[in-house]
Image (tube, rainbow, N blue to C red):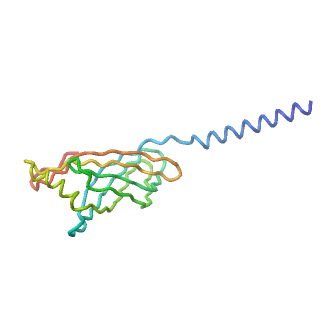
Amino acid sequence: MASGNRLAKIALIGTMIACLTACATFGPKLIKPSVSLIDVTPLNLNLSSQQLRFRLQIDNPNPFELPLETVRFVAKFNDSVVASGKSYQAVVIPPGQAGDIAIDVTAGIHQIAESLKGLLRATDMSIRYQVSGAIQIADWNRTVPFDVDGILDLDENATPPKQ
């Protein structure tokens, strides 16, 4: 009889440990944050390269903060790769809010020249862009991919897009 009670207690403790482990493992579900390109700013130009700053906005739709560990990306202008980069800037985005991250990259002049050739042949002053990559969220041990595309209108007289 004592042996039966002991087995029941061990089974109960084992079940409780399994339940606690499951709760810790699954935790809250992550809703994928959205990423948008705010702007691209030329920083420095020399004979061999162009330094660019890409500013990304990351919207956190979750009811908990998102501690960003790294952001890596590849940027294309008119279907030509112009830059790739990785940011180790730690950013914490509060629940239900947005945060900005700036990533400085160096692009070879030949990469920029390919995009400019297409622009010079075009009748309008716009560049198609695509920024894709992944966000590493601290403590989640997973990356969240993103892919953003749009058009940068370089015409001075263009009206800004309506939001």
**x 29%, y 58%: residue:** 54
- Residue 103, by quadrant, is bottom left
Q: Nearer the viewer, residue 15 or 141?
A: 141
Residue sticking out furthest to the right: 1
Tell me: 119 left or right of 85. left
**Residue 8, image x, y percentages:** 82, 32
Q: Nearer the viewer, residue 67 or 114?
A: 114
**Residue 87, image x, y percentages:** 39, 59
For residue 51, above or below residue 154? below
Q: Nearer the viewer, residue 18 or 97?
A: 18
Q: Nearer the viewer, residue 110 or 107?
A: 110
Tell me: 59 left or right of 151. right
**Residue 88, image x, y percentages:** 43, 60
**Residue 131, image x, y percentages:** 30, 49
Classify the position of the C terminus by image quarter. top left
Q: Number of numbered discs present? A: 0
Tell me: 17 left or right of 86. right
**x 27%, y 47%: residue:** 130
Classify the position of the N terminus by image quarter. top right
Tell me: 24 left or right of 58. right
